[in-house]
Image (spheres, rainbow, N blue to C red):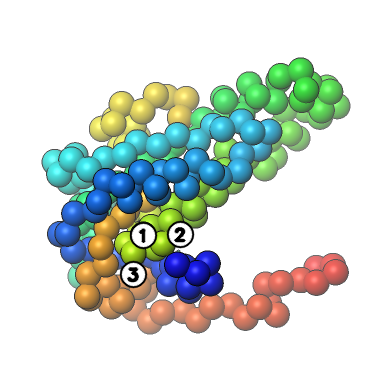
Amino acid sequence: MEFADVLRKRRMVRSFTDEPVAPESVERILHAAQRGPSAGYSQGVEFVVVTDDEMRHRIAGGGLGDERLKKMGMQPFVSQARVHIVICTSPELYRQRYREPDKFRLREKVSDDDLWRVPYWYTDAGCAMMLMLLAAVDEGLAAGFMGLPPAHLRGLLGIPEEYIPIGVALIGHEAPDARQYNDIGVTTPKPKRPAKDVIHRGTW
Ligand SMILES: Cc1cc2nc3c(=O)[nH]c(=O)nc-3n(C[C@H](O)[C@H](O)[C@H](O)COP(=O)(O)O)c2cc1C
């Protein structure tokens, strides 16, 4: 698919059909995620892929998951999505990487607080998420993202303490009614902020 079409088609989908997702598509989506950039090439982002029906329902079962969605009149789209990819990031891997010799000079001049004023482990996790969302569209699939409490995901999936699960990329086939469901709790879709308000040219 043309990149412009992938960009145009990409949206957070909140209603999926039962149709299974081809395993090869999942592998290509994961490959795309791994193509993402990482600060200092720290590669501190890791993934838990869940396709098991029961586990997907348990993931969706947190207080902020499908029960809440149903109460809001929405589809239980977390459990509906046939593939969950939990995106995890490790601050420690970034700290370690930036203590390596080629980064050491930088660290001597900059305090740890200053160095991590922008926590790159989150930017990199966001990059991986975006690549997966775009790759899903390229596969003719649909995707969404759901933030769920890290402790809930950690407990269910045995994610080690040093990793922060930032949320779940939900992948599946878009249901015919998907376009009806906008952002959670938002009944009227908000217009996109105009480019002139968000793009500052030259200076702010
Ligand atoms: C970091 C992040 C967290 C999000 N968390 C949720 C979420 O928990 N549930 C949800 O339905 N959408 C979530 N979204 C989707 C946004 O609501 C969505 O991207 C936004 O409304 C714009 O819609 P679009 O992506 O379809 O263009 C999240 C998006 C991002 C980037």
Q: Residue at left 36%, top 43%?
A: 27
| 110 lies left or right of 124 | right
Q: Amino acid at mark 1?
A: Glu
| Secondary structure category for the residue under label 1 | loop
Q: Quadrant of residue 74?
A: bottom left
Distance Cα–Cα, label 3 vs label 2: 25 Å
Residue topped by disc 1: 139
| 186 lies left or right of 200 | left
Q: Amino acid at mark 3?
A: Gly
Q: Is residue 70 visible?
A: no
Residue topped by disc 2: 134
Query: Label 2: how many residues lie within 10 Å, few (<14), some (14-19) or many (20+)?
Result: many
Q: Amino acid at mark 2?
A: Leu
Q: Residue at left 76%, top 71%?
A: 200
Q: Is residue 45 visible?
A: yes
Disc assigned to residue 93: none
Query: Label 3: how many residues lie within 10 Å, few (<14), some (14-19) or many (20+)?
Result: few
In what quadrant of the picture does the C terminus appear? bottom right
